[in-house]
Image (cartoon, grey):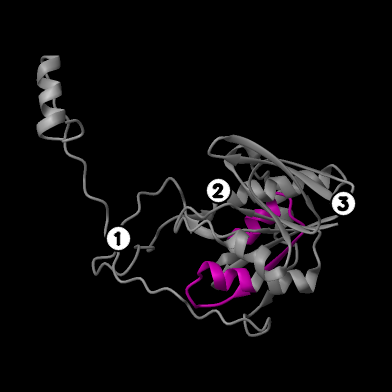
């Protein structure tokens, strides 16, 4: 069984994000980029399935500019076997990415597709569900445990009320939650090996996909700065501030 996983290029979660002076987007000059943390969890789960003998090959896919090869190499160093880059200068939005991956699913015929539940830059949390819809596959979102047996995936999901366990037939799309696993670090030997692993490159046109953005960003603004806290002397003073200044009680 092949497992296809995603690796989105995002600003590293440790970076303090800055907005461009013209408010058109995020300043990416000299900013450290990394694999989306939820996709790292997807990669780890796929590699574990291969190490357990459940999967034979792990294919990592990234959609974006040529510099996304950096994130694909990272995934290869973490244990993926082969990479695919869908190279485009168009803005990547969930529907366009889902179309590309659905086309690759038809080409590669994986038995399982694992994606992060969301990306930390746009927080859409839509791509996995769109892939399942476009490819006509079962889906299990927000997974905290995945067990593959007898051509089915038993998936424990994170829901508002606790946990839910469902069974879906393979092939299927699974999106990862934080509790699914803890990703490993890439060792130096594996980083060196990753440089020799295969990366195939396609364009959206090669896959018959229209990547034209459906959404337009009008303006990007940083959040308002938090006001400094104050120390109150009495409970009465605290209640007064909560009531009359913060207006959180009446």
Which residue shows up at 69% across the image and 46% down it? 44
Q: Position of residue 59 (x, y in %)?
A: 74, 61
Q: Position of residue 2 (x, y in %)?
A: 82, 59
Quick one: label 2 or label 3, which is nearer the N terminus? 2
> Against 8, is 55 above or below?
above
Asked if the residues shown at circle 3 and circle 1 are in contact, with their CB atoms under 8 angstroms apart, the answer is: no
Which residue shows up at 34% across the image and 66% down it? 25
Residue indicated by mark 1: 19
Residue indicated by mark 2: 37
Stretch in magenta:
71-99
Left or right? Give the position of 236 relative to 130: left
As rendered, which of 86 and 220 lies closer to the eye? 220
Q: Quadrant of the N terminus?
A: bottom right
Which residue shows up at 55% across the image and 79% down it? 211
Residue 133: in magenta span: no
Residue indicated by mark 3: 151
Can see residue 39? yes
Quick one: label 2 or label 1, which is nearer the N terminus? 1
> Against 66, is 44 above or below?
above
**Image quadrant of residue 228?**
top left
**Mark 3 Cα-neighbour bin, 10 Å: few <14, some 14–19, many ≥20:** few
């Amino acid at each position: 069984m092949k497992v296809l996983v995603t690796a989105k290029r995002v600003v590293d979660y440790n970076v303090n994000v800055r907005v461009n002076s013209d408010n058109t987007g995020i300043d990416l000059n000299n900013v450290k980029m990394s694999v989306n943390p939820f996709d790292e969890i997807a990669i780890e789960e796929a590699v574990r399935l291969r190490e357990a003998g459940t999967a034979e090959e792990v294919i990592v896919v990234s959609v974006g500019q040529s510099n996304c090869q950096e994130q694909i190499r990272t995934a290869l160093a973490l244990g993926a076997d082969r990479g695919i880059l869908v190279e485009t200068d168009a803005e990547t939005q969930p529907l366009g990415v889902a179309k590309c991956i659905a086309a690759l699913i038809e080409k590669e015929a994986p038995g399982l597709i694992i994606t992060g539940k969301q990306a930390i830059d746009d927080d859409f949390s839509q791509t996995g569900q769109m892939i399942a819809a476009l490819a006509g596959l079962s889906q299990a979102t927000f997974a905290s445990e995945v067990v593959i047996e007898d051509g089915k995936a038993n998936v424990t999901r994170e829901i508002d009320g606790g946990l839910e366990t469902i069974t879906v037939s393979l092939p299927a799309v699974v999106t990862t939650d934080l509790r699914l696993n803890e990703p490993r670090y890439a060792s130096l030997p594996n980083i060196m090996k990753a440089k020799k692993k295969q990366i195939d490159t396609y364009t959206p046109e090669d896959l018959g996909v229209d990547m034209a953005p459906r959404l337009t960003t009008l303006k990007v603004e940083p959040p308002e700065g938090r006001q400094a806290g104050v120390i109150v002397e009495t409970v009465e003073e605290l209640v007064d501030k909560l009531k009359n200044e913060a207006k959180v009680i009446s």
